[in-house]
Amino acid sequence: CSLASLRRPRVAIVGGGYLGLEMAEVFTGLGCSVTIFQRQSTLMRLSPPCHDAVVEVLREQGVEVRLDTEVRLVDPDCRRGTVEFANSEGGARGSEGFDAVFLAPGIQPQADLLA
């Protein structure tokens, strides 16, 4: 499937870490409509003032940011991928179709091994 052949492709990015934000910039620059799904309440585990500034810039660029939202399933299809998600606060559940899904969930270190 080629994103170039689509009019305004919709791209879902699963993960709001460094790689997810970098890819949001790339896809936005290519003219895509971008939605970031982040399981935590902040992007890149930033402090509140920094996080708020980053989210504001992303939204100014047209990126939809969905915090506290866990992706439960990505159902791939050559024409369209469906992303099923649920808000971790007990709120919205649903599914949406995207032309491409980029997985950038990141890792969480197992720091208790050092103790």
Image (cartoon, grey):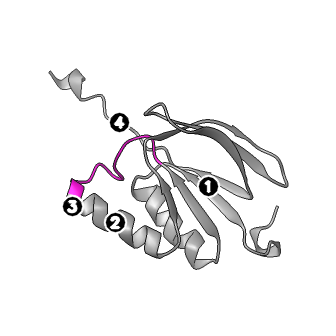
Q: Which of the two marks, 1 or 4, is nearer to us in this view?
A: 1
10 Å crowding of disc 3: few (<14), some (14-19), many (20+)? few
Query: What range of the chain is rendered magenta?
Result: 38-48
Question: Separation of disc 2 and disc 4 at Cα?
Answer: 21 Å
Q: Which quadrant of the figure has residue 84?
A: top right
Residue 64 is situated, as x and y percent measured from the top left of the image, at 52, 61
Q: Quadrant of residue 18?
A: bottom left
- Which residue matches tag 2? 54
Q: Earlier in the sequence, mark 1 or mark 4?
A: 1
Does residue 92 show up magenta in the picture? no
Helix, strand or loop under label 1? strand
**Position of residue 58 in the picture relative to residue 46 (left or right):** right
Quadrant into which the C terminus falls: top left
State the residue at coordinates (52%, 66%).
63
Verify whether residue 46 appears in magenta: yes
Q: Earlier along the polypeptide chain: callout 2 or callout 1? A: 1
Q: What residue is shown with label 4?
A: 108
- Marks 2/3 in contact by CB < 8 Å: the verdict is no
Q: Please report whichever mark, 3 or 4, sits nearer to the chain's N-terminal start.
A: 3
Which mark is drawn over residue 21? none
Q: Residue at x 84, y 52 (%)?
A: 78
Residue named by callout 3: 49
Toward the front, the furthest residue is: 91
Disc 4 residue crowd, few under 14, some 14–19, many 20+, Cα 10 Å? few
Residue 84 visible (yes or no): no
- For disc 1, the neighbor class at 10 Å (few under 14, some 14 to 19, many from 20) is many
**Where is residue 39 drawn, in percent x and y?**
44, 40
State the CA–CA distance, disc 1 to disc 4: 21 Å
Which residue is under mark 1? 12
